[in-house]
Amino acid sequence: MKTGGCLCGGVRYETTGPLRDITMCHCRMCRTQTGLYYAATESALDDFALTSDKTLTWYTSSEWAKRGFCSTCGTALFWKADEHDRISILVGSFDDDPGLVVGKQIFTRYKGAFYELISDIPTLEEGR
């Protein structure tokens, strides 16, 4: 089992199943929310549980997805597509190193001008 949460402790979660390799998203929405790129893994909803959601707020960021964050400390935590049975979890929110590697970079054509892509990681200029 892997656990994590926000900076102030108002949101806590655990996940028991396998996690996907890290995806780095460089789209404008992800960069705006996090200040850099979005580095997330993914869990099946059946393997994921919120153990505290006192300060969890969901923001509908598009017609088909929402983003979860702590309304007290501002920690970005989750991304969830409406029609999927999986949830993306920002890897920096885990309590301990989840032992994952970066598997791909997406929406690279929108990356910030102030950093470089990781050259040996697969990239997609658009989508997932």
Image (spheres, grey):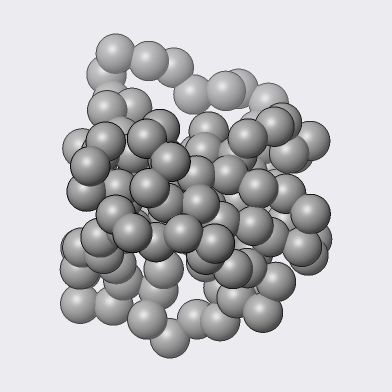
Residue beneath the point at 60% across and 39% down? 94
Q: Position of residue 60 (x, y in %)?
A: 20, 68
Q: Quadrant of residue 118?
A: top right
**Image check: 76 left or right of 51?**
left
Asked whether, in this view, residue 79 is left or right of residue 39, the answer is left
Residue 23 drawn at (x, y percent)? 56, 46
The foreground one among 32 and 76 is: 76
Look at the picture and state if 44 lies above or below 37: below
Rendered view: 67 above or below 120: below
Is residue 111 left or right of 47 when viewed as pictured?
left
Count up the numbered dots. 0
Front residue of this view, candidates 118 and 8: 8
Residue sitting at x 40%, y 32%: 7
- The location of residue 72, given as percent across then percent down, is 23, 42
- Write down the quadrant of residue 4 in the picture: top right
**Residue 28 seen in render:** no
Taking the spot 78% from the left edge, 65% from the top edge, the residue there is 17
Q: Is residue 58 left or right of residue 41?
A: left
**Where does the image place residue 20, in percent across and percent down from the top left?**
70, 55
Q: Residue at x 64, y 57 (%)?
A: 14
Q: Quadrant of the N terminus?
A: bottom right
Q: Is residue 98 above or below residue 53?
A: above
